[in-house]
Image: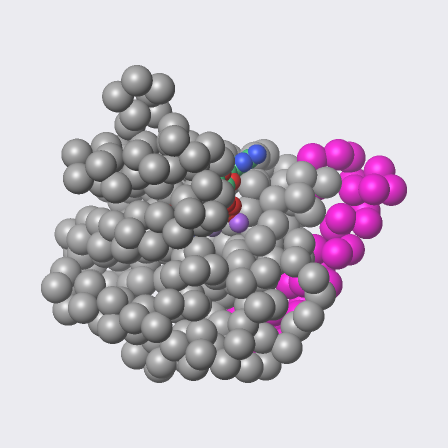
Amino acid sequence: YALSAAIPAALDRGEFHLDYQPLTSLRDGRVLGVEALVRWRHPELGTLYPGTFIELAEETGLIVPLGSWVLAEACREAATWSSFGAAAPFVSVNLAVRQVHRPGLVREVREVLDRTGLPPERLQLEVTESTMMSAVEEPVRALRVLADMGVRIAIDDFGTGYCNLTYLRDLPVTELKIAGEFVAGLRAPADDPASRTDERILASLVSLARALNLTVTAEGVETEGQADRLRAIGCDAAQGWHFGKPEPAARLLERLSAAG
Ligand code: G
Ligand code: G
Ligand code: MN
Ligand code: NA
C-alpha cells in the first residue's frame, strides 16, 4: 500500500517509463504493432515491473492517473514513428477495468489523439476478458464509439477468463491476444499428449477468430519451434521473447530500422 500511495509523487517526478514489445507477423516477419508496458524507476527499489504495483494501483484507484499517463506517453512516442510511413506500427495500450468503466474514457482518448496527432488506426486498446465479463452497457458503448473512430480493440489474455463470449457479439473487437499459457504447451514435443491438447485449443481459438474476421496474436512465444507450430495452425501474429523482449522505444526503433 505504501508503494501504491507513492504513485502520484512518482508520476510528478517522472519515475515511470514505457518499454515496447513487438507484435510480429507470422507471415512476413513485419512488426505490425508494439505493446506498451509500464516500468517504474524507483529511487530506492530500482526498476519495478507491473507485477509488483499494477494490482495495488487497481485496488486503490491510482491506476486511473497512472493509466492516463501511460496512454498519453504511448501516443506521444508512437506519433513520432512516422518515418515508418504507412507501415508504422500501431501502439497497444493495456486498459484496466476501472479505466474502461470511467465515464470520461472516450473524451480522454480523443483529446490524446488530437494533441499528439496519432491517427486512431495506430492506437490499440487492450482489455481483458474479465473486464468484458463485468461489462455493463456504458463501457460497451464507450468502446464502440472508440472503434467507430478507428481505434483498434484487442481482447488480452484470451482463453483464460470465464467462457462468456457474448462480448464478441456486442463489441467491435479487432484482435484476440491468446494467453501465453496455451503457447507454453507448444514447447513440448508435438507428440506429447498435453502439448497436443494445447495445440488443439489454440487451433480452435484461431478458427473462432477466423470465423469472426479477427486478427489472432499468440503471446509468450519463446522459440522458433513454437512459432512454426503457430504458423501451421494459421495464427496471424506473435509476441514474445523469440521476436523481441520489451525495450525502450529508441532501441526497438533502431532494430526495426536496421532490419529495413
Ligand atoms: O511488463 P510485464 O511484461 O511484466 O507485464 C505484466 C502485466 O502488466 C501484463 O499483464 C500487462 O498487461 C500489465 N501491464 C503492463 N503495463 C500496463 C499498463 O500500462 N496498464 C495496465 N493496466 N496493465 C499493464
Ligand atoms: O499484457 P500482458 O499480460 O499480456 O503482458 C505481457 C507479459 O508477458 C509481460 O509481463 C511480458 O514481460 C511477458 N512476456 C512477454 N514475452 C514473454 C515470453 O516470451 N515469455 C514469457 N514467459 N513472458 C513473456
Ligand atoms: Mn497486454
Ligand atoms: Na496478455
Q: In the drawing, does residue 80 fall left or right of residue 88?
A: left
**Exactly how many numbered labels are in the figure?**
0
Q: In the drawing, does residue 65 fall left or right of residue 153?
A: left
Could you tell me what secondary structure mostly forms the magenta stretch?
helix
**Residue 10: horizontal and vertical position, in percent?**
24, 35
- In the rendered image, the residue lying farthest to the top is 44
Quarter of the image with the N terminus is: top left
- Residue visible at 30% across and 18% down? 44
- Residue visible at 18% across and 53% down? 76
- Residue visible at 84% across and 38% down? 192
- Residue visible at 35% across and 48% down? 62
Quarter assignment of residue 9: top left
**Residue 22: horizontal and vertical position, in percent?**
39, 45
Magenta part of the protein: which range? 186-214
Q: In the drawing, does residue 220 fall left or right of residue 4?
A: right
- In the rendered image, the residue lying farthest to the right is 193
Q: In the drawing, does residue 130 fall left or right of residue 57?
A: right
**Residue 63: horizontal and vertical position, in percent?**
37, 50
The residue lying toward the viewer, choosing from 134 and 165, is 134
The residue lying toward the viewer, choosing from 65 and 21, is 65
**Residue 256: horizontal and vertical position, in percent?**
29, 41
Asked if the stretch drawn in magenta spans residue 221, the answer is no
Residue 182 visible to the viewer: yes
Residue 228 visible to the viewer: no
Quarter of the image with the C terminus is: top left
* For residue 91, above or below residue 252: below
